[in-house]
Image (tube, grey):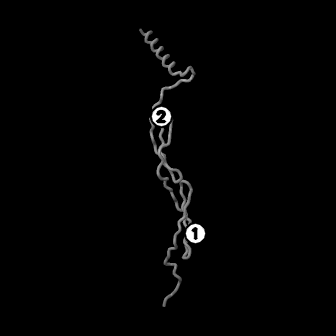
Amino acid sequence: MRLLKRLGILFLSAMILTSLISCGKDEIVLPPHQHTYYGKHIAGNCQVKGYMEYTCACGDTYHGEEDAEYGEHTFVEDPVPVRVATQDTPGIKRRYCTVDGCSEVEYYNYEWQPNDLPDTEFD
């Protein structure tokens, strides 16, 4: 009885293997794979839009929908102004993005200080 079971299993295995070989070639055709994708958001920055990336357990990956907007800049202000404001000329401050290195300038007006008055005595 055991011998019949083993022969049956051996015969069934041979049939399956034979059915997987296509057209007499030596390549094995596997049954179709049903993909199951899991998505994760890839964050963008000020130069690249973020997007959804979908990956299957088999390693197949594709990019889905893009974010509508670019990511935000992360600016830090340069502590030394490009040009200091005077009463006649506006000053210029520069700030840099820590993500992509871009910069932007801001113009600012001179702010009057009490010690700006000339030394004058009134009678």
Q: Amino acid at mark 2?
A: Ala
The numbered disc on residue 57 is: 2
Disc 2 is placed on an element classified as: loop
Most extreme residue toward the left is: 1
Q: Is residue 71 above or below residue 62?
A: below
Q: Position of residue 92 (x, y in %)?
A: 55, 68
Most extreme residue toward the bottom is: 123
Q: Residue at x 53, y 62 (%)?
A: 77
Q: Residues within 10 Å of mark 1 (few under 14, many from 20)?
A: some
Q: Amino acid at mark 1?
A: Arg
Q: Position of residue 63 (x, y in %)?
A: 50, 42
Disc 1 is placed on an element classified as: loop
Q: Residue at x 56, y 56 (%)?
A: 101
Q: Nearer the viewer, residue 120 or 54?
A: 54
Which one is in front in this view, the residue at disc 1 or the one at disc 2? 2
The numbered disc on residue 110 is: none
User: Which one is earlier in the sequence, the residue at label 1 or at label 2?
Assistant: 2
Q: Is residue 79 above or below residue 38?
A: below
Q: Which residue is mark 1?
A: 83
Q: Position of residue 79 (x, y in %)?
A: 54, 64
Q: Quadrant of the N terminus?
A: top left
Q: Residue at x 46, y 11 (%)?
A: 7
- How far, Cα to Cα, is label 1 from label 2? 57 Å
Q: Residue at x 52, y 86 (%)?
A: 120
